[in-house]
Amino acid sequence: MYKQKLVLVGNGMAGLRCVESIISKDPTAFEITIFGSEPHVNYNRILLSTVLQGNTSFEDITINDRNWYTKNNIQLFTGETVIKINKETRKIITDKEREVYYDKLIIATGSVPFILPVTGVDKEGVIAFRTIEDCQKMIETSRKHKKAVVIGGGLLGLEAARGLLNLGMEVHVVHIADYLMERQLDSTASLLLQKELENQGMNFLLKKETQELIGTKRVERVRFKDGTELEADLVVMAAGVRPNIQLAKESGIDTNRAIIVNDYLETSVPNIYAVGECAEHQGIVYGLVKPLYEQGEVLAKHICKMKCNGYQGSVLSTQLKISGVELFSVGDFLGDGTTKSITTFDELDSVYKKVVFQGRKIIGAVLYGDTNNSSRLLDKILKREEVSSEEKRDLFQSPSTAEGLIASMANHEIICNCNAVSKGQSLKRFKIRD
Ligand SMILES: Cc1cc2nc3c(=O)[nH]c(=O)nc-3n(C[C@H](O)[C@H](O)[C@H](O)COP(=O)(O)OP(=O)(O)OC[C@H]3O[C@@H](n4cnc5c(N)ncnc54)[C@H](O)[C@@H]3O)c2cc1C
């Protein structure tokens, strides 16, 4: 019997999660071929921060090893980039002049780091933070050099900075906005974060715009638009990412900021789908794995011809993976003229909580210093439930132990946000008595 040919372009987190889901739903439906530009099997990019911070190897962060691909009869081509999609003949062409026919094609090409368009970015010692090679370069640099400058005070920049501190470097974080992580935190939470990171040894330059990187062969200094300069022998660019859409664009697939997809992750070309950071759904491009996994699940159901409602967008939540920092933000945490909020601020212990309501429904929150109620808040937002006065009070009280927290949760509440695992599912999976 003819097996449909499924080709995946991009051997990263979103694409592979989708393929895993397709295999679990219909293991024999497709003959699968995967291309990845990186010379590796699929690894957990999120954990690059822990690799940089030491003690974690590539094997530790591998999600699918070579045996997994073999076991599932997947043909994997690593270190090979797809450079063209021929819509008419339904063939992809790679940089190694390989041509492969597809019945269904999934584009999951992710993002590329945004490198500031300033002079000097091509100098030795200027790197991004996206791949395992980037981590290795930072680790090597730290053996010979001591002055690191991280450009970008968002999640990625701060995690890179923490890693470089662990590697024994002197670290300055340069940020263009008034305060750190301004897309995930309000100014109060951000100031608490800055204070904690300063205590850990980080230095910050806020409201600074980079003009030029100076040096002979290797970077030596960063010059800012206000005329000031900072010494540097390593510059890490963590000023955001751009969806990797070159292949789709050149192949005649409709793009905007990313590849435009509908609720079933279909692109403008029949039988070609896009998932992950390269996809744009209803004008939104997601940059965190939870929404990308949700997209992958919808696409898997659609491709396996299972009933599904389509992708409806995701609620975003953020946590920072730096020890000593307890931080959580979700949804619309700033609010506007139509919303109301409850805020508590314990300046003595640096615990700050803000929950934003639309009517009696929670639409966003930011927590700093005590994130014990993060799962509960997320659950309320996802379920769009009205909150009773009693529940409202509980949201600001923190059970003193983890056991207390879990005991106080209802069975349907989500414990692990990455995979949307509820308390009830965990109790069943680990045979725990309620
Ligand atoms: C250091 C770091 C920390 C992070 N921390 C978090 C976190 O805490 N929480 C969170 O939710 N998210 C985090 N993220 C973001 C998360 O890793 C991404 O959202 C996720 O990896 C995106 O998955 P993707 O499959 O869309 O893209 P990727 O994982 O980037 O995969 C795309 C793959 O496609 C390959 N490719 C591109 N073009 C081609 C081509 N033409 N042919 C073949 N292959 C191609 C690329 O080389 C790449 O391997 C972090 C990211 C980084 C870098």
Image (tube, helix red, strand yellow):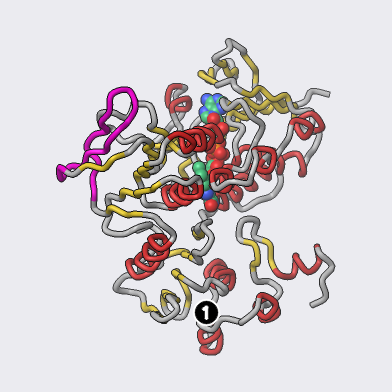
Give how far across and how far down residue 39 sits, in percent: 61, 25
Give how far across and how far down residue 300 sits, in percent: 67, 42
Asked where in the image residue 270 lies, by quadrant, the reply is: top right
Q: In the rendered view, does 3 fall on the left or right side of 362?
A: right
Q: In the rendered view, does 129 fall on the left or right side of 413?
A: left
Q: Residues within 10 Å of mark 1 (few under 14, many from 20)?
A: some
* Mark 1 close to ligand 1, CB under 8 Å: no
Q: Which residues are magenta?
A: 208-227
Q: Is residue 70 above or below residue 51?
A: above
Asked where in the image residue 185 lies, by quadrant, the reply is: bottom left
Picture quadrant of ligand 1 = top right
User: Where, quadrant-wise, is the N terminus in this rendering?
Assistant: top right
Q: The disc labelled 1 sits on which kind of residue?
A: Glu
Asked where in the image residue 30 lies, by quadrant, the reply is: top right
Give how far across and how far down residue 429 sits, in percent: 80, 62
Q: Please indicate, yes or no, whether residue 108 appears anywhere in the rendered image.
A: no
Q: In the rendered view, does 250 fall on the left or right side of 390?
A: left
* Element under disc 1: loop
Instruction: Say which residue appears at 65% left-offset and 56% top-offset.
Output: 419
Give how far across and how far down residue 292 sits, in percent: 56, 47
Q: Residue furthest left?
A: 227
User: Where, quadrant-wise, is the C terminus in this rendering?
Assistant: bottom right
Report if residue 131 lies within the magenta region. no
Q: Residue furthest top?
A: 97
Q: Please indicate, yes or no, whether residue 56 appears anywhere in the rendered image.
A: yes
Instruction: Say which residue appears at 80% left-offset and 37% top-offset.
Output: 27
Using the image as rendered, state which of residue 314 and residue 407 is in the foreground: 407
Using the image as rendered, state which of residue 52 and residue 98 is in the foreground: 52
Q: Which residue lies under the disc numbered 1? A: 386
Instruction: Say which residue appears at 17% left-offset and 42% top-offset.
Output: 225
Report if residue 212 lies within the magenta region. yes
